[in-house]
Amino acid sequence: MARKESNKIPKELAAITEPASVGYFARTCRPVYALVFLLPFIIIYEILVFAVNPQLLSEPINNVRGGVVAFVWIQNFLHHLGLDAKSAWLCAPLVIIITLLALQFTSRQKWKMHWPDLLIMACECILISLPLIILSPIFKRLNEPPLLAAVELHHHSFVMDIITGIGAGIYEELVFRLVLIGLLMLFFETILGVKRTKAIFISVIASAVLFSLHHHFVFINGRFAQAEPFTKPLFIFRTIAGIYFASVFAIRGFGIVAGAHIFYDILAAILNTWLFNHG
């Protein structure tokens, strides 16, 4: 039955959204699982941004961070649809909700959920984030002067790091994995006729490089802005992270990769704060 659930996915996206064949892995690849699992994070992000610093969203050029920029891109998209600034902010989470609901409907997979799976998903996301947590200090040590400056700059804004970490996990994964990889697959496989395996490889690498560059140079509110200074160690690390997240997305789906990204950012913020406080 589990194998039957996964054969209704549209052809162009099958290679990146087809779930594992049985049990927990089949169930938790469904879009409905991603929606239910991520909904608390979406709500927490909206509440914390409004409570702590609403200007973060209205003036992103002065505080360019990946999760905020991706969120603003969603807002700009809603502006083009005719929504005002406040409505666009409030409706941005609906983009994710509607997208996942649409994927669930079109996949024709089961809606029934096994609720204990959500706790296992959280544990899985933490485990998936650990390789990047271990790998990150190696590249950051190569980039030590900029890193120390960044820690000194942000150690007073731990809560803001948590907020932007949640936003990055949700909205960067939406933009760079779910949307971008899907569009790249459609372009290379369907329009250009590239073989599926090669199309996946190209799409993953391209999305990873753009994901990494996005942390250094961003296009927002109609103009380019510089985020973090460009350094090879951080660029290489984020490219590796982009490939890693894309692979997780291909194997485990949107809910797991977004959760893993969220937990990575949260754990990284906690570790940075702990290390700073301990000299």
Image: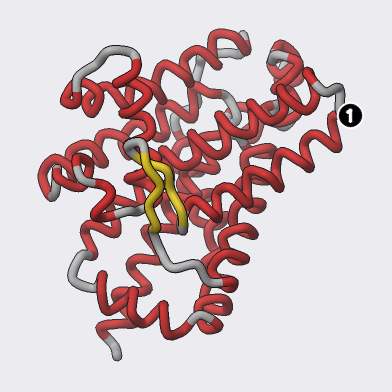
Q: Nearer the viewer, residue 6 or 95?
A: 95
Is residue 275 found left or right of 215 in the rendered image?
left
* x then y, percent, for residue 202: 77, 41
Q: Residue visible at 38% across and 58% down?
A: 227
- Circle 1 sits on which residue? 195
Q: Residue furthest left?
A: 51
Is residue 13 found left or right of 36 in the rendered image?
right
* x then y, percent, for residue 109: 61, 13
User: Mark 1 falls on what kind of element?
Assistant: loop
Residue 275, above or below 270: below
Is residue 90 found left or right of 110 in the rendered image?
left
Report which quarter residue 235 is drawn in: bottom right
For badge 1, the amino acid type reads Lys
* x then y, percent, for residue 162: 29, 56
**Quadrant assignment for the C terminus:** bottom left
* Coloration of the structure image: secondary structure
* x then y, percent, for residue 261: 48, 50
Q: Residue furthest front?
A: 223
Report which quarter residue 203 is drawn in: top right
Q: Residue visible at 29% across and 21% down?
A: 79
The crowd level at tag 1 (other Cα within 10 Å; few <14, some 14-19, many 20+) is few
Report whether residue 157 is seen.
Answer: yes
Q: Residue visible at 46% across and 84% down?
A: 144
Q: Residue furthest right?
A: 195
Is residue 92 found left or right of 36 in the rendered image?
left
Q: Residue visible at 14% across and 43% down?
A: 54
Residue 68, above or below 190: below
Q: Nearer the viewer, residue 138 or 38?
A: 138
